[in-house]
Amino acid sequence: AQSVSQHNHHVILSEAASLELGCNYSYGGTVNLFWYVQYPGQHLQLLLKYFSGDPLVKGIKGFEAEFIKSKFSFNLRKPSVQWSDTAEYFCAVNQRAGRRALTFGSGTRLQVQP
Amino acid sequence: GAGVSQSPSNKVTEKGKDVELRCDPISGHTALYWYRQRLGQGLEFLIYFQGNSAPDKSGLPSDRFSAERTGESVSTLTIQRTQQEDSAVYLCASSFRLGQSMEPQHFGDGTRLSIL
């Protein structure tokens, strides 16, 4: 069975600090990878996704993520966070040719202090 | 708006009662998913519909849980004889292209279910 691990449960940063949130998955086959964000009081929104091509993908609001196949990782980064980035971030994976359902990590709560 | 719509937004009920949760997917989206999120945990998959058939029901936790979908539209998730451990936020998502696993899923606001 596939699984997703997000090692940082709660991250507190000051504005302008750099961000990196870890995500590792376990699955031997080909996967699609996603990062979702949930701002306070809002529904889950897609930040970015990777399924093929350049392993460095850029998403909305200045976020990017790098797929490193050898490490089964898909870490999320942002060079300079803003207070408005305060939210919960979820990494998710599904199988390219198999199970469509997403397997989610447990989420990382990011708090950006002004 | 044209997003995924779920109702009710909140439901409080007594243990042992049945509840029905509704999801209206984005128009034209052929795939529909149900997930739940217990407090402090990530999302758990429940069931997936392609059109009105359910090729993956592997996440339903017990036979008290069932779901149906009419046409390529509304879906209802029914929980019979609710238990306290059923308390969670139930999320519905839909995606566009049938069979395309890389199509992102679009989520609704969820139904917060509380079992007393």
Image (cartoon, coloured by chain):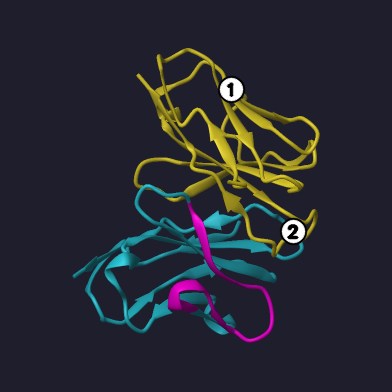
Chain colours: A cyan, B yellow
* A52 inside magenta stretch: yes
Disc 2 residue type (three-letter): Gly
Estimate the spatial distance between the alpha carbons at disc 1 and disc 2, rounded to whole Å. Answer: 27 Å
* Apparent side of residue B72 relative to residue A41 in the rendered image (left or right): right
Residue B112, placed above or below residue A73 = above
Q: Give the position of the C terminus of chain B as an image quadrant.
A: top left
Residue B12, placed above or below residue A108 = above
* Apparent side of residue A52 relative to residue B12 in the rendered image (left or right): right
Disc 2, SS: loop
Residue with the mark numbered 1 = B64
Residue with the mark numbered 2 = A98
Q: Quadrant of residue A1?
A: bottom right
Judging from the image, mark 2 belongs to the subunit labelled A
Residue A109 shows up from this direction: no
Nearer-the-camera pick, B39 or B85 = B39
Disc 1, SS: loop
Discs 1 and 2 lie in a common subunit: no
Nearer-the-camera pick, B113 or A5 = B113
Residue A61, placed above or below residue B75 = below
* Apparent side of residue B2 relative to residue B28 in the rendered image (left or right): left
Discs 1, 2 touching: Cβ within 8 Å: no
Q: Quadrant of residue A102?
A: bottom right
Residue B44 position within the rendered picture, expressed as x and y whole percent measured from the top left: 52, 46
Disc 1 residue type (three-letter): Arg
Q: Residues within 10 Å of mark 2 (few under 14, many from 20)?
A: few
Residue B50 position within the rendered picture, expressed as x and y whole percent measured from the top left: 78, 44
